[in-house]
Amino acid sequence: MELLNIKNLFVNAGNKEILKGLNLKINKGEIHVIMGPNGAGKSTLANIILNNPAYKIISGEIDFEGENINELKTDERARKGIFMSFQTPEEVPGISVTNFLKAAKNAKEKEPIKIFAFKKELEENMKKLNMNPSYSTRDLNVGFSGGEKKKNEILQMLTLKPKLAILDETDSGLDVDAIRTVSKGINMYKNSENSVLIITHSTKILQELKVDYVHILVDGKIVKTGTDSLASEIEKEGYAKYINM
Amino acid sequence: MKTQLKEVDNNIYNIKNKDEYSFKTVGLTEEVIREISEKKNEPDWMLELRLKALKTYNELSMPTWGPDLSELDMSKIATYVKPKTNMKKSWEDVPEDIKNTFDALGIPEAEKESLAGVGAQYDSEIVYHSIKEELVKQGVIYTDFDAAVKEYPELVKQYFTKCVPITDHKFIALHYAVWSGGSFVYVPKGVKVDIPLQSYFRLNAPGAGQFEHTLIIVDEGASLQFIEGCSAPKYNEINLHAGCVELFVKENGFLRYSTIENWSKNMMNLNTKKVVVDKNGTIEWVTGSFGSKVSMLYPMSILNGENSKCEFTGISFAGKGQNLDAGLKIVHNAPNTSSVVNSKSISKDGGICTFRSDIKVRPRAEKSKVSVSCESLMLDSISRSDTIPVNDVQTDEVEFSHEAKIGKISDQAIFYLMTRGISEEEAKAMIVRGFANPISKELPLEYAVEMNNLINLELEGSIG
């Protein structure tokens, strides 16, 4: 079953062309990985799927569950079940992690959430992610270390249970243990009905995941698609052979 | 938080009752002042003071700095509007439309649940006043100011104009010429009033001025929390608020003075507040300023005694057509005094927020500490925010820090919240409430909720 289908997508940031005819199809239950050199358009891809106003679609189409979502606002896309883990999550003073997640969950659910069950689930998830429970009362990402910010993104993913989770360099800047925790979080979330799109520079995060497809993104286009062996190849040999193709 | 947004009733603050009064004066002449004084049946010394203040008003010139006040025409302002009722000690006796207004503002309910005493002013006079019996037994006085002039003449004479002199500036002279209503509080030595007192000032009459006088004396070792609320419905003509707050905190005394102002956007709010703090005394100011067309408001703290302290926590929110010029003045006039200032402002739709601070550390105020932090948040590129600090430090032995941050609301932060399914409007409101949070949490719960509601109201429909 098709979940996300991107057709011949051209995207600009300001006047600069970033994506130049990108095609990508993700089915339910799959884990996809996007690798590529700096500036290839990896983060642009993640951001345009959620309609970051800093980017603009010039042509092409993004379909989610068979419906064109080009015109949908960011929050509408999120409520349809698309999630993005940020490379540098925003610090938002004065809003606690708990209250933020409650607001997000309430925005998505038809019925008001049950506070007790919500808190219990939050506590359990934090435990599994090796997060200090005190973080739930702290201001959202304010003064969090790089690692805590990334874990907090995974915590949000586990709480909101999206259909598609896009992880934009969630592993960058993390130590080995933190990367393992993040992988554990992804495995906790993953089931046959949902999908993950991982944007990464390294194969470490992939070791404990069952990856279905690896795509190489160069200069705004996917130039090669393979399985997890492609990721190992890139790790050894770099992108040289895919640049100037 | 989402549900709270829905609960906001847009119309509470805008309830307009019929412009009914038992007596009214318009303009500012000697005749008008004699009429007011006669109507109040006050002692001669008060009439003389009013006339002297009028003379001072006519002699002083308009401020040459700050927002434009040229729309203010004193000959058109209703200087005294006596409501169609006298002061009552029970809400049941207050005329229905007036009572309904205060009901909608939640005053009688708050009184039952969380206040030790309440004063409610409607136009120029207090219409309701109450204080818990236990406090009366402990010698606490909380009454309307007109009554205090008659019932406690010695106390009033001892303190009235002693904190804020008639000659301070043009609008304080105006205030003393036509003052009416307000509250008088005396907390005797050692008495701790644990539950707050609240005075609420409601201006209903179009084109009128409100000139209430609040005087609070916290005697040695005593403590008090006082809350002041203000609002008015919106009219097309200019209304004026030129109240005066005189506060005295004696040795080892403590006073927290909180204000939530939500004047309508035709109001010129030219209010004056000042405190004199003695040895080991503490003043805490907490203010939230939302309404008014123009505000000029700079509460002043004079730290006169050794070890005295001042804490100022304030927020202002300027929307379309609003120019809020607010800040504070502090004089460190004794050794080991300290002041902590935490000010925030939010501007949107072309609103202007100016933070003005004037901090003096006198030569004798050695080992004093000053810490000022002000932060501004602009919600769009047409709004303005300025910080104008004046620091005059006359001794070397002082710790002084000043931090100012001015910024626009972050599009990335809005995007971040929206990627979690939160709408743009709610995302903005969450960021603004978060920004205001350090201030709201200083307020008693009901007022923190009110402040969040005011923020939501201000933001409503701000998404194009």
Image: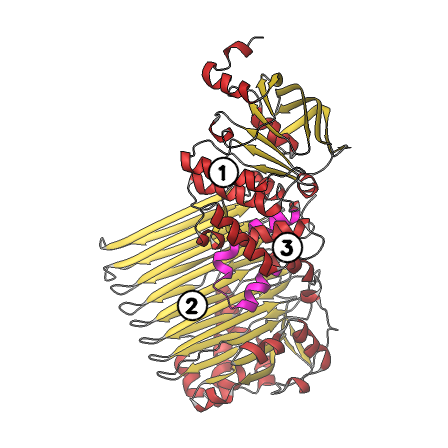
B142 shown above or below A244: below
The amino acid marked with disc number 2 is Lys
Q: Identify the residue under disc 1.
A: A182
- Along the viewing direction, whichever of B411 and A107 lies nearer the viewer: A107
Question: Where on the picture, by quarter, is residue B246?
Answer: bottom left
Tell me where residue B196 appears, x and y as whole percent.
49, 76
Determine whether label 2 and label 3 are within 8 Å by CB.
no
- Examine the structure image and report whether residue A162 is included in the region drawn in magenta: no
Judging from the image, mark 3 belongs to the subunit labelled B
Residue B102 placement, left or right of A228:
right
- On residue B274, which mark appears? 2
Which residue corresponds to the image point at 65% horizontal and 53% vertical from the top-left? A106
Label 2 and label 1: CA atoms lie apart by 56 Å
- What range is drawn magenta here? B425-453
Whether discs 2 and 1 lie on one chain: the answer is no
Looking at the image, residue A178 sits to the left or right of residue B80; the answer is left
Residue at (34%, 62%) from the top-left corner? B331
Task: Identify the residue shown where x is 38% and y is 84%.
Answer: B188
SS for tag 1?
helix
| The furthest residue to the bottom | B137
In depth, the one of A23 and B246 nearer the eye is A23
